[in-house]
Amino acid sequence: MMIDPRVNVIAKRLVNVKRVIAVSSGKGGVGKSLVASTLALVLKNEGYRVGLFDLDFTSPSTHIILNVPLVAPKEDKGLVPSLACGISYMSLVYFIGENPAPLRGIDVSNVLIELLAITQWGNLDFLIIDMPPGIGDILLDLLRFINRAEFLIVTTGSLLAFETVKKQVVMLCELKTPIIGIMENMQQTPNICCSIEDKTKKLGLPFLGKIVFDPNVESAIGDENKLLNTSIGQTLKHVVKNF
Amino acid sequence: MHEWALAEAILTTAAQIAEVEQLREVTCVTVRLGELQDAELGILKFALNEMKSDLFKNAKFRFLRAKTELSCRACGNHWRFKKEKLDPVTVEAIHFVPEAAHTFIKCPKCGSPDFEISSGRGIWFDSIQGVK
């Protein structure tokens, strides 16, 4: 009888979380972590109770974006996420610091199950998940353990990014997974032939908005107020009105 | 894994199995605990007693310790995990998330972090007994 008991408490840990939003993309480098972190800040400023869970275990960055102190979470029948900028925050970095985490697929799945099983999120309106790129282990495990997660997909205007996004969309649609819509990040020049907005509509999905490339984003990293004033923050303020 | 979260996971899973097996009372639950995770048995037993429902009122909880064995994918070396060689902060990190071992432990032969935890990682149900 080789049964792993951890998986049986995951639903209990999330029972008081109203919505789970996975910020995702088929491609790396499109700004998922910045969008996820800023989305959490915007929702918190709108008065919601918000959590942020960094699932990019091998390349975590949301703790840098939000300048999260790496203080161990409190223990209370599990681990209670620390508050960072008023957001309940959980990441593997609490356990490994800034050291590398060389993890294979089975290890990645085990970390996810472990953190889902021990984290006491409490009452939240939104749990924002910063996803790693692609349609690998974490995406499949998220669909397995939190099948009510809704996806907010980030792309850039690049054909290379959007082609990978399309694959992700096809898979999520086949699985009847809710997709909130697609956002275009780092827009620099108008798309020549067909805009991301048009391409999104062809996929039958809502286009949430375009985030104009903002040279001030880099200097806003680690500063809540500056992040909210970037083009990412300003665009997301409009996007969340339809949540 | 945190002992209280672990206790809740054990009781939830045992109750699910009891329902499937149509047990009206559970008499014994045997769980295998990997030494890598280093669960504190005293806290775990206390948490089980505090959280258990009537289904487990006469149940015994047995724990089998499983040695942790690691296998290097790079050079094929096999070795035993020994927490005594690690500092307390690292032991605590591995306690909560055993995969943190890949950050802090290297193959003693070739230095690679690319190893498999071939046994003794976490917790597994071994058996459950009860009255129908």
Image: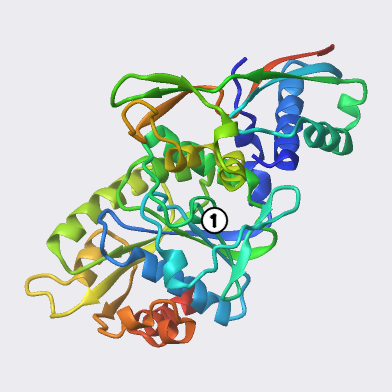
Vertical arrangement, residue A92 with respect to residue B115, above or below: below
Vertical arrangement, residue B14 with respect to residue A56, above or below: above
Instruction: State the image coordinates of residue B20 (x, y, percent, origin top left).
Output: 71, 20
Q: In the picture, residue B70 is in which quadrant?
A: top left
- Residue, disc 1: A94
> Could you tell whether B102 is left or right of B92 in the image?
left
Numbered-mark total: 1
A30 or A163: nearer the viewer? A30
> Could you tell whether B108 is left or right of B81 in the image?
left
> Could you tell whether A153 is left or right of B42 in the image?
left
Residue in the picture at 81% in, 33% down: B42
Instruction: State the image coordinates of residue A23 (x, y, percent, origin top left).
Output: 40, 61
- Tell me the quarter of the image containing the N terminus of chain A: top right
Vertical arrangement, residue A62 with respect to residue A176, above or below: below
Residue in the picture at 55% in, 42% down: B97
Amino acid on which disc 1 is placed? Tyr
Residue in the picture at 62% in, 19% down: B66
Chain for disc number 1: A
Most distant residue in the left direction: A193
Instruction: State the image coordinates of residue A216 (x, y, percent, origin top left).
Output: 30, 85
